Amino acid sequence: TLFEVDLASGMRTQRGPSNQYTTTSGLAINFELNLAYVLDRGRNAIDLYNIAAPGTLNPTRVADNNGNGSGTSIDNGIDLAMPPDGSSLWLQNNNRIRLVDIDLNTGFRTIVSGLDPDNGNAILGSGPNFQGVGGLSQDEDGSVIIQDLSLQSVLRVDPVTGARVFLSH
């Protein structure tokens, strides 16, 4: 269920339908456009909400493994982040240990860095391989920041080349 939280009072207001999700694990917000993207790890799906609308919000499915978008699968998504230009989403995928870019207009999914099971398990990008990803964000330069629990490290990923470097190890 999606809730709105008043930061001053701590009051929660239900904004999405009850029992909408099985296991939510990621949230990305575009504050300029009042859009929220929710990752449902249990259903391997990403939904879009217009958070400026009043009352109960009904989601629009952006991408899933059942015909909404195409490209590599969403299997076991861990977290979401939005690049600075707001044109896509980054998905951190744990089963396949990779970073995926999702086009918000088409739902098309492209592997940016890490294991590519669609291409003979090639590793895209250079640097230390992901082993057990746990969270992602972005820095002010537009690079993706990924926590890797198995490596006990934080890595920076170039979203164009897929190159990975340790920030903390």
Image: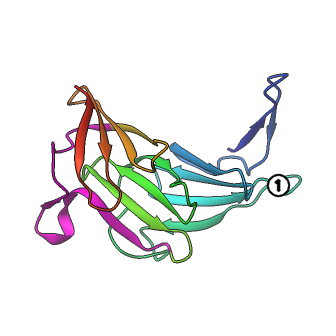
Q: Is residue 132 above or below residue 17?
A: above
Q: Is residue 76 left or right of residue 30?
A: left
Residue 130 within the magenta-colored segment of the rendering:
yes
The image shows residue 31 at horizontal and vertical percentages of: 71, 50
Front residue of 4 and 16: 4
Q: Is residue 87 left or right of residue 3?
A: left
The N terminus: image quadrant = top right
Which residue sits furthest front? 141
The image shows residue 48 at horizontal and vertical percentages of: 64, 60
The mark tally for this picture is 1
Q: Which residues are magenta?
A: 107-133
Which residue sits furthest top? 9
Residue type of the residue flagged with mark 1: Ala
The image shows residue 4 at horizontal and vertical percentages of: 77, 39
Q: Is residue 116 above or below residue 71?
A: above
Front residue of 15 and 156: 156
Q: Label 1: how many residues lie within 10 Å, few (<14), some (14-19) or many (20+)?
A: few
The residue positioned 51% from the left and 44% from the top of the image is 26
The residue positioned 15% from the left and 42% from the top of the image is 128
The residue positioned 20% from the left and 63% from the top of the image is 116
Q: Is residue 28 above or below residue 107?
A: above
Q: Is residue 157 left or right of residue 85?
A: left
Residue 69 within the magenta-colored segment of the rendering:
no
The C terminus: image quadrant = top left
Front residue of 49 and 65: 49
Label 1 belongs to which residue? Answer: 52
